[in-house]
Amino acid sequence: MACTFPIEREMAVWPPPAPLRELLLDADPDERRIADHLAHGELYVAKNCGTAAGVIVIRQTREHTWEIRSEEHTSEL
């Protein structure tokens, strides 16, 4: 049986709270690029027992097109 995690949209601001920042920097160590993705995209967080287990930033590039700009998860998944 696959594990499921609740996913919530979070405020996409730089700098994000420490646990989210660490995950985002694991995905892309360029803080300026992450800040740009957050400024123009949406941040979603998967949680395991209330703790961030994964993050994804998506950004709309065209009317019906969204791209994943940053994605990372903890090693426990």
Image: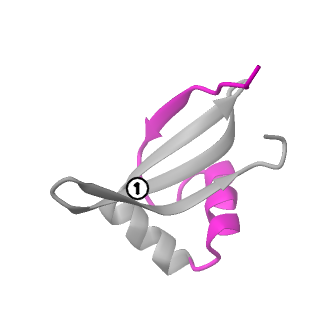
Q: Residue at x 70, y 66 (%)?
A: 26
Image location of residue 54, percent across then percent down: 65, 45
The one of 63 and 5 positioned closer to us in this rendering: 63
**Residue at horizontal 73%, vertical 25%?**
2
Q: How is the image coloured?
A: one colour
Extreme-front residue of the structure: 1
Left or right: where 48 falls relative to 24: right
Helix, strand or loop under label 1: strand
Q: Residue at x 62, y 51 (%)?
A: 20
Question: Which residue in the rendered view is the most extreme toward the left?
Answer: 63
The residue beneath circle 1 is 58
| Residue 8 or residue 21, whichever sits in front | 8
Which x, y percent locates residue 40? Answer: 31, 63
Image quadrant for the C terminus?
Answer: top right
Q: The residue under label 1 is which amino acid type?
A: Ile
Q: Which residues are magenta?
A: 1-30
Q: Determine whether, in the image, residue 68 is placed left or right of residue 19.
A: left
